[in-house]
Image (tube, grey):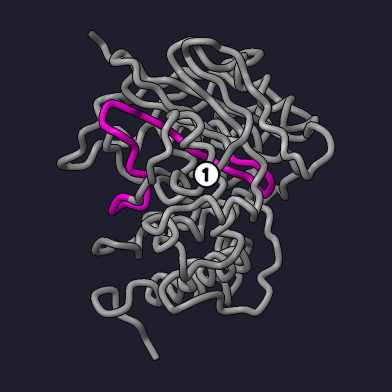
């Protein structure tokens, strides 16, 4: 039965993408399987548990941004028709975070919290932590944590209630994220969820969060000069040519598509926290240096937007088969 945006926004968006996929239209045909899985994840948060008995692990890839876009459009506010099914994941993903290697702006020293049950330090975790330390300036604290279901025991009731109907994978990401954030903030207090699903950080703190299938990363700052942050982590797995065209503009030649995806995600997180609207990948133009990047947003601001920033500069690095990206927006004064 047909769904209407005003009555059933989730199904309306789902079927809007499903119809062109059924007749072979791109990028809907390529993205439809990830869209279905993301819709299951989203819907399970509202219907009392997972919709499948054992949801299989799924690599968070550029194609899964379709589902994140669906969740953002059809979430806690009145939806509007989507401009593209390939939009960025935005604030929804900023709420999905975790970490265990972290440092402070005061010491710039990283402490590896080794799980006594693990037997030895996680080498990849240590490498990611060191890479983040190199990316971050002294006024930004960063951290990384391997996602671990045992972090569920560390959640406060107000945090647990925010994801009590979510699938287990989402609950684990959320729980590990709270453990990481508390370590970075130096607090034992709960970190609730805002109406936009982002973490409710203390007054005077700006932050950004991201995750892939194994790790979560976070960046925070209490420095008044720091206005916004954007961070991302992505596996550098090969992408199909169809997905490369979704991510890269025609004038972005010689850039790895998965790297471009990660850099544009970091840009979007900083942009959205300043009040910017949803972006498509082609709204962002990248220029790369050896381990730095510049990004220009080519998208008119919507009425009521607080963002007055369209140019961003950041840095990135590769650790094994992963990319890390970080950018900082400073206040002008």
Q: Is residue 31 magenta?
A: no
The residue under the point 30% across, 38% down is 276
Residue 82, by quadrant, is bottom left
Residue at image coords 54%, 36%: 249
Magenta span: chief secondary structure: loop
Q: Can residue 261 be seen in this view?
A: no
Q: Indicate the quadrant where residue 46 lies.
A: bottom left
**Can residue 209 be seen here?**
yes
Q: Which of 73 and 183 is in front in this view?
A: 183
The quarter of the rendered structure image containing the N terminus is bottom left
- Percent x, y of residue 86: 50, 52
Rate crowding at label 1 as few (under 14), some (14 to 19) or many (20 or more) other CA atoms within 10 Å: many
> Is residue 63 rendered to the left or right of residue 302?
right
Q: Nearer the viewer, residue 170 or 93?
A: 170
Residue at screen point 30% across, 34% down: 202
- Residues shaded magenta: 194-216
Q: Residue at 43% of width from left, 13% of height from top?
A: 139
Residue 206 part of the magenta segment: yes
Q: Residue furthest right?
A: 119
Residue denoted by label 1: 177
Q: Which of 122 and 277 is in front in this view?
A: 122
Q: Residue furthest bottom?
A: 1
């Amino acid at each position: 039965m047909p769904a209407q945006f005003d009555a059933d926004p989730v199904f309306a968006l789902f079927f809007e993408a499903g119809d062109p996929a059924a007749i072979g239209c791109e990028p809907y045909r390529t993205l439809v399987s990830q869209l279905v899985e993301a819709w299951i994840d989203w819907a399970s948060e509202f219907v009392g548990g997972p919709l499948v008995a054992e949801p299989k692990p799924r690599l968070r890839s550029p194609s899964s941004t379709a589902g994140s876009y669906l969740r953002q459009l059809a979430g806690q506010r009145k939806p509007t028709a989507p401009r593209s099914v390939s939009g960025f994941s935005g604030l929804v993903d900023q709420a999905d975070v975790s970490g265990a290697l972290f440092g402070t702006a005061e010491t710039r020293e990283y402490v590896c919290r080794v799980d006594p049950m693990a037997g030895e330090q996680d080498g990849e975790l240590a490498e990611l932590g060191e890479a983040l330390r190199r990316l971050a300036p002294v006024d930004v604290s960063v951290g990384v944590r391997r996602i671990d279901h045992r972090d569920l025991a560390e959640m406060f009731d107000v945090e647990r209630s925010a994801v009590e109907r979510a699938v287990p994978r989402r609950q684990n990401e959320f729980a590990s994220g709270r453990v990481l954030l508390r370590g970075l903030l130096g607090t034992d207090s709960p970190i609730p969820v805002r109406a936009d699903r982002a973490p409710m950080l203390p007054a005077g703190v700006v932050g950004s969060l991201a995750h892939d299938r194994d790790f979560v990363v976070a960046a925070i700052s209490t420095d008044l000069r720091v206005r916004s942050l954007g961070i991302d982590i992505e596996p550098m797995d090969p992408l199909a040519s169809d997905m490369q065209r979704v991510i890269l503009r025609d004038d972005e030649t010689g850039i790895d598509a998965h790297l471009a995806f990660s850099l544009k995600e970091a840009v979007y997180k900083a942009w959205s926290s300043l009040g910017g609207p949803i972006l498509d990948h082609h709204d962002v133009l990248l220029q790369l240096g050896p381990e730095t990047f510049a990004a220009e947003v080519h998208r008119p601001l919507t009425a009521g937007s607080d963002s007055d920033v369209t140019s961003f500069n950041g840095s990135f690095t590769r650790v094994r088969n992963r990319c890390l990206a970080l950018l900082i927006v400073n206040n002008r004064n």
